[in-house]
Image (cartoon, rainbow, N blue to C red):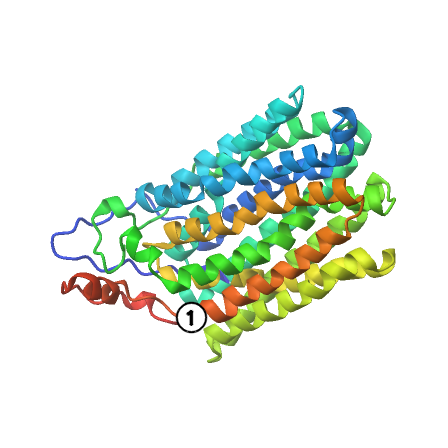
Amino acid sequence: MKFLDQRVKTPRRVMGARRPPVSQGPLTPPRRLIFLITLAFVVSYVDRGNLATAGPLLSEELKLSPTELGTLLSAFYLAYASAMVPAGWLADRYGAKQVLGFGVALWSGATLLTGLAGGFTAILALRLLLGLGESGVFPSGSKLVRSSVDTTRIGIANGFISFGYQIGPAIGTLVGGLLMARFGWRGTFVLFGVLSLLWLVPWSRVKVHEVTTRQGIATAHVPPFRAILRQRALWGTAIGIFGGNYSFFFVLAWLPTYLVKARGLSMDAMATIASPAYALSAVMAVIGGLGIDHWVRRGGSVNAAHKGLLAIYYMVALVTMVGMALLPIGGSIACLYAYNFFGGLASPCIYGPSQIFAGPGATGRWVGVQNMCGNLSGILAPALTGVLVDASGSYVSAFVIAGLTSVVALVGWIFVMPPVSPISWQAVAARSCGEELPPDNPSDSPP
């Protein structure tokens, strides 16, 4: 990961503004920082996905209907989406390192306690706590990337982070599924909760330089929240991620139960089929990130790279969702793998444009709003699927809806989101109040 070792230049100071404090001692190298952030995403997606993996066992032990299981799966996203904007604000205000560390501690404890929970109500409360803890991972991770990695390396940095949240479900489904099949779901939750807490040990030694809103940096680099909310680009990314996340969360939440209940697979067979599909997506995320950076460094358009990959992915998603429901088991699994192949390839494009648009001083809040909208799908998809399965006894309508939401994603990413390039917050401020501001930081220019 040597190619990540190029830091973003520190924004130039405005006369009268205080210089951001720099941690004592050398800063953590970008490659180590990205590794730990990636590992946090792995932990996050293992812990949030455990309930989906345990779905067949948990629903049998606690006598849960599909609607009740869907409610538990959606509860995480209710808290997660609701806390996303405050988490982004906290990351921009006080620093992403602190917000991410606190979040990992909170969600690890919730994971551990779920293994000790006695019933539906207790698990529901812990899923809400899990969502609250994990709400900071995307805003904080994106801010740290934008603050520590040069713009010409944002693609691969996001590729590794995408690898983390794609490989997390693979690890959780395979390891968790095999452990649950042999030792039960309760002990598996306790074990994963304890292992997640260990991440805090290396994170406590991380030293980063962050631009935060409480440090008095010029509005040319740290715009007010209202200025961020007025950007068409923000709402393009928000609509795009809302539409695209529906199928992602639908598969993440219901694939294990679908393969076991509707396709007749054992827990072991489900784990060995679903896990490699997630792993494929993770590998393709790294390849996609490398490809974007290579394209840009050779003079290719940043906008074409991101929008092109997103357009291909969501057209494929439209077809493969329907194919997974209607084709025989072999064709259904082939569609699952095609969906994950292209989804992984395009995954660095989900947050790369936002980091470029927003810059180091606004990425936390921008991604907080974007991800809040995206995770409304996480609330909707699991719960609606449970209701549809209860009503029809089939998953076909659920898969069709998941496919159609890809059209919404295409509208947001391709038609609403403008060409990808850094927003001049200096110009935005000048238009709104007529003040003369210092020039933008050269490091925020398009690569």
Residue under label 1: 418
Towards the viewer: 263 or 12: 263
Residue 397 position, x and y percent, is 74, 53
Q: Seen in the image, is 296 located left or right of residue 359? A: right
Residue 205, picture quadrant: top left
Residue 286 appears in view: yes
**Is 50 in front, or is 415?**
415
Q: Is residue 289 above or below residue 23?
A: below
Q: Position of residue 410 (x, y in %)?
A: 56, 66
Q: Residues within 10 Å of mark 1 (few under 14, many from 20)?
A: some
Which of these two is toward me, 396 or 40? 396
Q: Residue at x 65, y 61 (%)?
A: 404
Most extreme residue toward the left, as rendered? 16
Q: Is residue 292 placed above or below 20 in the rendered structure?
A: below
Residue 192: quarter of image? top right
Q: Residue at x 70, y 30 (%)?
A: 188
Task: Find the residue positioned furthest to the front.
Answer: 391
Secondary structure beneath label 1 = loop
Q: Amino acid at mark 1?
A: Pro
Residue 157 picture location, percent across and down: 50, 59
Q: Give left or right: position of 338 versus 414.
A: right
